Structures are given as structure tokens and as C-alpha cells.
Image (cartoon, rainbow, N blue to C red):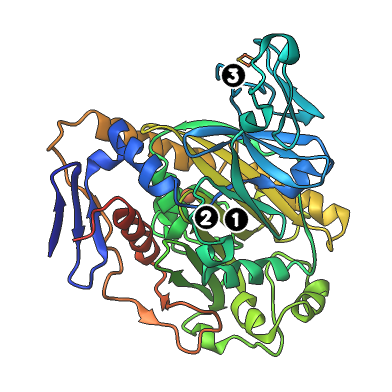
Amino acid sequence: VMGFSRRRGSVSFGVDGSVRAVGRRAFIDDDVLGDEFDRVFHPSWQLLGFADEVREPGDYIVRTLGRDEVVVMRGEDGVVRALHNSCTHRGTRLCRASLGNAAHLRCSYHGWTFANDGRLVGVPALRSAYPADFDPGGHGLPTARVEDRRGFLFATWDAGAPGLDEYLGEIGWYLDAFLDCGAGRWEVWGPPQRVRTRGNWKIPTDNFAGDGYHMRTTHQIALQQGIYGDTLADGTRGRSGTDLVAVNIATPGGHSVRAGYVVESGRSIDDRDLAAPEFPGYPPERWADLAAAQTPEQVRFTSHCEVAHGVLFPNTVFLSVAHDRAVGEDTDPLTRFLVVRTHVPISARETECLYWTLVPTAMDPEWRQRSYRFQARTQSAGGILFEMDDFENFARIDAALARSAPDRGAPVDLSLGADRGVVAKDFPGPARAEVGTLSEHNQRAFYRRWAELMGELP
Ligand code: FES
Ligand code: FE
């Protein structure tokens, strides 16, 4: 069964309705990006940052929400708002810093002044030169809807969108499980790293949804360096005598999680000893506390999980992974980090990545410092072993797609693992969970939601 849109190329579907391929134009064409802003980004909730970045009244950060720049600002009333960063007089960009603290935003052109809740509170010559019926109350800054979920600040311009919990749906359960595994509050470590990269925003996003397939080629050096423990005889990952078994969970909303479990070679995730839960990368002496902070169902999901990553549709991704001492000092133990990223489109062929490292405040300061260091050395803009190799591939994709004639080349293929996934039995979380270490199950869900919003379903 083939779905085909004359307007922008093709999306191909399998007989089960899953997306099997996406035409190349979707990754290089600014007209497609224009449609994505209207159809994909506008109705969606997007991560702008974290409550930790705007702790005090007046604290602000400048971020992107769809097409628009917004000032994410905590008002004197303690409420965080996303204010359109454009004066309501002639449209001047109001805030030119990327973060700070201010009681007011004052326009550099004629001096209109907005309070940190977006109200227009100062108009030079208001009484002497404006008509009597001019109403400053009608000239406040447009504000997007903002919701704070466990310190994650999401926003949408769409007044008709469902609330954030409904929007996230079943994936919210998995997010909570990861966060509860930290036994308390998570803190954002510093302002985000930011880097502009070549390539379409969907390329790194689909990578995070579930691409275990690139590990043995793109990240072969990291595996050989022993980033997951011993180098095995075949040059791949692992502690001797173990396998990594991945479970893919994807929802109709396009959200996904891929969780990889360390099990004894040849065993399944059902053979884990849940009477003695293990949380790789956290200090073993804390494992009992971490288990006690979770429900039994959450422990069945988090125990023995060495790596987990996924997408909160459309452009927020996360990765929680335990790395070994190959990235640190010889005495460093296996250490976990959690990185959350957004992939913000600058154009169809350029993306700004923002990276936040989150650390659980329940861990001791030395562990938190090491967790941050491990993230910075691998999965950061300048990270060796991972990020540079990924970005190199994303740039090569962009270069080759952009240098091809419009009808040259195969569409982007998404059939890995299709029809081969086995439903995980008694999996503790909601939504369909498929066992399949090499599978594009989650990517298919991402592009199906994208195709649905773009009006490309058959
Ligand atoms: Fe901002 Fe005139 S454009 S005050
Ligand atoms: Fe990678």
C-alpha cells in the first residue's frame, strides 16, 4: 500500500499502516519546514527549558517556540510565562540577551515598557499624545500556554491543544519512572549547551527515538574503548557474558522510549532477578534506596536498564545511559547521566541543539560532578566518542540529499525490524512494548505521527 502526496513527495506505508519510507524532500525543503511549523509544531507542546533556569521573579531565558522567539520569564507573581519577544508597537525585538533577570522589558525603539508578566505598563507620552481611547491593556505581549511538569517547562501556542499530560499520554508513565529512579528531585546542571548543526531536525530526532543500529558502525570506536565495559572478542560492547536486550515503546502521539537491559547471555528480560534490583551507573550501595523510591511496576521497568532514550514528539529527546571509565579516570566507576535535548529548526537544513544535563539531588556532590563530566565528554556538543561521529553522519546526509536531483535516490528507509518485533509479555508500563534490539519501530511511530499531522496518511 503506497501513500503518495503530489504536494511534497512520498511517504510509503506497510500493509500494517506503519511508515516504511519518507521521501528525501522532507529533509531539505524549506516549504516543507513551513508546513511543519503550521501543522506539526503549532499544535504540539515543546520543551523550552527548566524551572531551575528561572527560579526567581524576573529570571528569564530566551528560547524558540515553533517559528517564534519567546522570553520565558518568571513574573513578580511567581508564574512562568512565554512572552512573544517582539514589541507590540512596531515589532522590535525586545530582549537581546539570552538569559538574565529584569523587572521590565523596555523597547529600544520608542521605549514602550512591559512588566515581566507581559503587560504594557509604560508608554512615553501616553497622556499628552495618544488618543483618549488608546488602551495599553490591549497591547500586552502575546503569551503562549506554559505547563511545568516536574520542572520541565513545556509550551504551546495552540489554545485548543489538550493539556500537557493528555498530550504526553502513556509516555508520561515512562518519564516518571526514570525520574523516580533518582529518588527525589532532579536539578539542571548549569545553562544548556547550544550548538548549531547541519541537517534537518528530524534526522537527529529519529536517531534518538530508537537507533540502536548505528552503534556498531558509527560508535565502533567507543565500543572498542570499552565504554560499556569490556571489549568482547568480536570487538563489540559489553561486560563478558551479558547481552543487551532492547524494548521499544511507541505511542500514537509519536512519543517513544527505547530501553536496553543487561541480561546474562542468552537470557531474556524476564530472567532478571527483581528481588535484587540493579540500577547500572548508580552507586550499588544506593540501589536499595532507589528501588524504595519507586513503585514495584517502575522497578520492573528500570531495573537492569543500562540505556534508555526516546522522543517527546516533536523535537524533545532524552538519553539516560551508564558509561564506563573509558570516558573518565581509571578509578571512575560505571556512571550514569541523563541528558535532555531539543532540536530546534533554524531552516530545513540547519538545526540548533540545546543540551541540558539533569542530576538527582539525592546523589552526593562527587557523583553528580562525575555524571556531568561523563555527559560532557561524550553526549555533548564537543563530546568525543559519540556526538562528533553522529553529527558527521547527519551532515553527510544533508550534503548528499541536497546535492541530488529531486527524483534521484531512494527515500529514507524505515523498515528495520518491521513485522519482527515480539510483544514484551507482562511489561509493566502502558502502550505496546516490542522486544527488538535492532528495530526502527519507534522511528516508524515518529514519522507516522508526523505524516498524520502533515496530512499524508493514506
Ligand atoms: Fe517598540 Fe516603538 S517599536 S516602542
Ligand atoms: Fe549516536
Disc 2 and disc 1: Cα gap in Å? Answer: 6 Å
Pointers 2 and 3 in contact (C-beta within 8 Å):
no
Which amino acid, mark 1?
Answer: Ile
Which mark is first along the chain, 3 or 1?
Answer: 3
Pointers 2 and 1 in contact (C-beta within 8 Å):
yes
Residue 286 lies, with reference to residue 150, above or below; the image says below
Closest to the observer: 198 or 107?
107
Residue under the image location 87 percent in, 53 percent down = 365
Closest to the observer: 330 or 179?
179
Disc 1 and disc 3: Cα gap in Å? Answer: 55 Å
For label 1, count other residues whose C-alpha is less than 10 Å away and answer few (under 14), some (14-19) or many (20+): many
Residue under the image location 42 percent in, 78 percent down = 432
* Residue 417 visible at all: yes
Disc 3 within 8 angstroms of ligand 1 (CB): yes
Which mark is first along the chain, 3 or 2?
Answer: 3
Which amino acid, mark 3?
Answer: His
* Residue 232 visible at all: no
| Mark 3 lies on residue | 89
| Marking on residue 49 | none
Q: Secondary structure at mark 1?
A: loop
Closer to viewer: mark 1 or mark 3: 3
| Marking on residue 223 | 2
Q: Secondary structure at mark 2?
A: helix
Which amino acid, mark 2?
Answer: Leu
| Marking on residue 227 | 1
Corner quadrant of residue 440: bottom left
Closest to the observer: 274 or 25?
25
Residue 394 location in percent, x, y?
Answer: 39, 39
